[in-house]
Amino acid sequence: MKEDDSMKKTFLLSRILLLVVTVMLSSGAAIASTAFCDETLTGPGAEVAAVISLMGAVGANHIDKNDPPVFIAHGTSDNVAPYMMVKSMVQQLEKVNAEYSFYPVAGVAHRLQTILDTEFDGKTVRDHSLGFCFEAMKLGELIKELR
């Protein structure tokens, strides 16, 4: 392998490692939202490529157009992290024209496994979230460049 190819692959792999996906579960959503909304917490040269919100919500006042894409899956019967908080989050994402995907799981409470196993358009929420991360991190493009 040529030295240039090796350096290119090293650079691309470094870029993959620097891209971060913030996953928010339940009450961790409030903590994680601080990290993804405050670039000083992600470290120099790092970027948050996507936010995955499962059973949690980011305060709507923290959301703006410059935030990374957000994937949201939440039970409509959740009384631990109320669904109305998530609806407020989605309304703010729409208001600022931010990129997001929303999967409201009808009749489900605060149950991660049930939410992840629920199907939308023939795929589980789990599969949709992985595809969302793959796309947000542009891994397909990076893999092509590595070949």
Image (cartoon, rainbow, N blue to C red):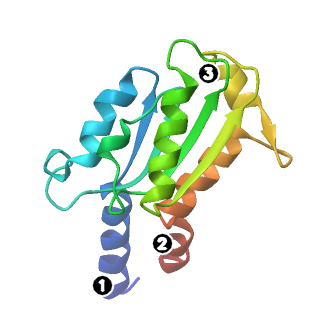
Q: Estimate the x, y position of residue 129 in percent, counting from the top left.
A: 61, 45
Circle 3 crowding by C-alpha within 10 Å: few under 14, some 14–19, many from 20: some
User: Badge 2 is on which residue?
Assistant: 142
User: Badge 1 is on which residue?
Assistant: 3
Give above or below for 65 relative to 43.
Answer: below
Element type at marker 1? helix
Query: Along the horizontal axis of the image, is 97 left or right of 11?
Result: right
- Residue type pointed to by label 3: Leu
Q: Which of marks 1 and 2 is nearer the N terminus?
A: 1
Which residue shows up at 84% across the image and 49% down it? 121
Q: Estimate the x, y position of residue 30 in percent, counting from the top left.
A: 33, 28
Q: Earlier in the sequence, mark 3 or mark 2?
A: 3
Circle 2 crowding by C-alpha within 10 Å: few under 14, some 14–19, many from 20: some
User: Badge 3 is on which residue?
Assistant: 112
Contact (Cβ within 8 Å) of mark 3 with mark 2: no
- Residue type pointed to by label 1: Glu
Element type at marker 3? helix
Which residue shows up at 57% across the image and 69% down it? 140
Which residue shows up at 33% across the image and 65% down it? 15
Mark 3 or 1: in front is 3
